[in-house]
Amino acid sequence: MLKMLIVVMGVAGSGKTTLGRALASALDEDFWDADDFHSAYCKEKMRTGQRISAEDRRDWVNRIVDLARKQVGRTVVLACSALRAETRDQLCIAAVCHKLIFLRGTYSEIYPKLAVRTQHYFSPVLLESQFDDLEEPEDALLLQCYQPLTTLVSLSLDHINRHQ
């Protein structure tokens, strides 16, 4: 079981991977991108603008949790949409302690970034459905996604260090 799981969450295009990598580097801890745990089938569905099913999401989360349970005493920073409370609850049972960092933005702030992104399988047509599915967490550090990366990292580190 993980010592600590730090979940950087939000809709696609909010900057989860960028902040997660930077935060993991600053903490000298491991970084995982939940996108890497999606099956090829799910990636293809999303690439073609199809939503993944609840069963698809369940299998995806289970892959992450199974690996996390094997990481005894370690800390991991995980970039993960974690849009639903149920998903966050499932992820966090794999750690003694967890922190949530929620990158919030509006559709109009995020869509333009997604529309020009070419190195990712997620189709921008799915962004609206992500906002529909989003259950904003009450127990997370809330950050506006458009802030400079240095600010996001600094605020995240302050939060993690203050609540250990």
Image: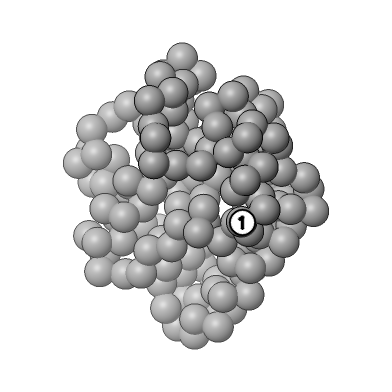
Q: Residue at x 68, y 66 (%)?
A: 62
Tell whether 106 sits left or right of 47. Answer: left
Q: Please state the horizontal and vertical placement of residue 24, each as a whole percent of the image.
A: 31, 61
Q: Is residue 155 above or below residue 108?
A: below
Q: Is residue 112 above or below residue 46?
A: above
Q: Please state the horizontal and vertical placement of residue 61, each as a whole percent of the image.
A: 65, 60
Q: Residue furthest left?
A: 150
In this view of the protein, can residue 86 be seen by the observer? yes
In this view of the protein, can residue 87 be seen by the observer? no
The quarter of the image holding the C terminus is bottom left
Q: Amino acid at mark 1?
A: Ala
Q: Residue at x 36, y 52 (%)?
A: 20
Q: Is residue 146 above or below residue 48?
A: above
Q: Residue furthest top?
A: 108
Q: Which residue is more in the foreground, 96 or 149? A: 149
The quarter of the image holding the N terminus is bottom right
Q: Residue at x 51, y 42 (%)?
A: 121
Residue carrying label 1: 40
Q: Please state the horizontal and vertical placement of residue 161, each as a whole percent of the image.
A: 31, 59
Q: Residue at x 66, y 28 (%)?
A: 129
Tell whether 126 sits left or right of 59. Answer: left
Q: How is the image coloured?
A: one colour
Task: Find residue 152 and report its image quarter.
Answer: top left
* Number of marks: 1
Q: Please state the horizontal and vertical placement of residue 7, each as a whole percent of the image.
A: 48, 54
Q: Which residue is more in the foreground, 64 or 23? A: 64
Label 1 neighbour load within 10 Å: few <14, some 14-19, many 20+: few
Mark 1 residue element: helix
Q: Which residue is more in the foreground, 101 or 25? A: 25
Task: Find residue 118 and report its image quarter.
Answer: top left
